[in-house]
Image (cartoon, rainbow, N blue to C red):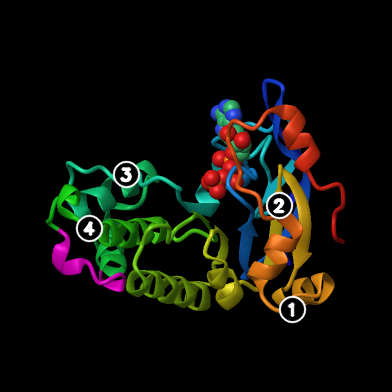
Amino acid sequence: MTIIEVKHLVKKFKHFTAVDDLSFKVDKGEIFAFLGPNGAGKTTTVKMLTTILKPTSGDIKINHYNIKSDVIKIRRSFGIIFQDPTLEDELTAMENMKLHAYMYNMKKDDIYKLSKQFLEFVDLWDKKDVFVRDFSVGMKRRLEVARSFMHEPKILFLDEPTAGLDVQTRNYIWKYLKEIKEKHKVTIFFTTHYLEEAEKYADKIVIIDHGKLIIEGTLSSIKNRTKTKTLEEAFLKLTGHHIRDENEDAEMSHIKRRSFIYK
Ligand SMILES: Nc1ncnc2c1ncn2[C@@H]1O[C@H](COP(=O)(O)OP(=O)(O)OP(=O)(O)O)[C@@H](O)[C@H]1O
Ligand SMILES: [Mg+2]
């Protein structure tokens, strides 16, 4: 069953097209990896899917609701971890959980119970009264994971949830995510530059570049179609080896842009 449906999505910033006619579907309960080089348009897409940015054109359905008419219902359907941390440093872990609960208008009785449940879940219950400013990067990310579960969303959007984390913390974050997926049938939509995470955990993968969909499918189908042995090989074959220069001029980016799309 489809839980996220994107049709002909476009986002323009003045004359620059960051997301260019993107269409794809995500099934309920799957772990979906949304990949692409720096500047490919991943965060811009996540922001549109989570109602933070308004699309220039195209249609988005989340949990069967239309993004144009059912913003409030859609916002209740998902949890999000942004690429850049969004915790309040001057509040404790527990206060951050409560703030989130108030924003989601959660029932008073649930707030303590669910805060405890999810802080325990990410092994941070004993740190509940510590100020977030004193947390390590890994602890902050674990707290964000706990917070994103608080209102029991059907979908989790995770924009580079493990960027900059050590291997141990990355493994723990994935252990939490897999458990939450199994227990609560949550759909997980994530971006990452750690391709091995997509290889290990994703049921389905989409690769975009210059805002366009390049390929979609399971890991094995992508490797088969590109005649490669690893996702990294496939990724490089599809998106090229050059470094993405933010200042590259429009003409160069047009030349570098790949003209084919794998179907
Ligand atoms: N508000 C904005 N105004 C103008 N251009 C923007 C804006 N936001 C993003 N862009 C541009 O859109 C393109 C896509 O950016 P986006 O952040 O979506 O990429 P990304 O795939 O998330 O990259 P990364 O892997 O580096 O996080 C980039 O060229 C970026 O500079
Ligand atoms: Mg990004």
Which amino acid does the dot numbered 2 rest on? Ile
Residue 169, position in %: x, y? 34, 70
Look at mark 4 in the image and give the residue it sits on.
136
Sort mark 1 into few (<14), some (14-19) or many (20+) by Cα contacts within 10 Å: some
Look at mark 2 in the image and give the residue it sits on.
208
250 sits to left or right of 226: left
Identify which residue is drawn at 15% across, 52% down.
Answer: 134
Sort mark 2 into few (<14), some (14-19) or many (20+) by Cα contacts within 10 Å: many
Q: Earlier in the sequence, mark 4 or mark 2?
A: 4
Q: Earlier in the sequence, mark 4 or mark 1?
A: 4
Measured in 3D between alpha carbons, the distance from the residue under mark 4 to the one under mark 2, in whole angstroms, is: 32 Å
Looking at the rendered image, the disc whose residue lies closer to the viewer, 3 or 2, is: 2
Q: Earlier in the sequence, mark 3 or mark 1?
A: 3
Q: Which residues are magenta?
A: 120-128
Identify which residue is drawn at 68% across, 28% down.
Answer: 249
Look at mark 1 in the image and give the residue it sits on.
220
Measured in 3D between alpha carbons, the distance from the residue under mark 2 to the one under mark 1, in whole angstroms, is: 18 Å
- Residue 110's disc is none
Q: Earlier in the sequence, mark 3 or mark 2?
A: 3
Residue 72, position in %: x, y? 55, 40
Q: Disc 2, ligand 1: is the CB inside 8 Å?
A: yes
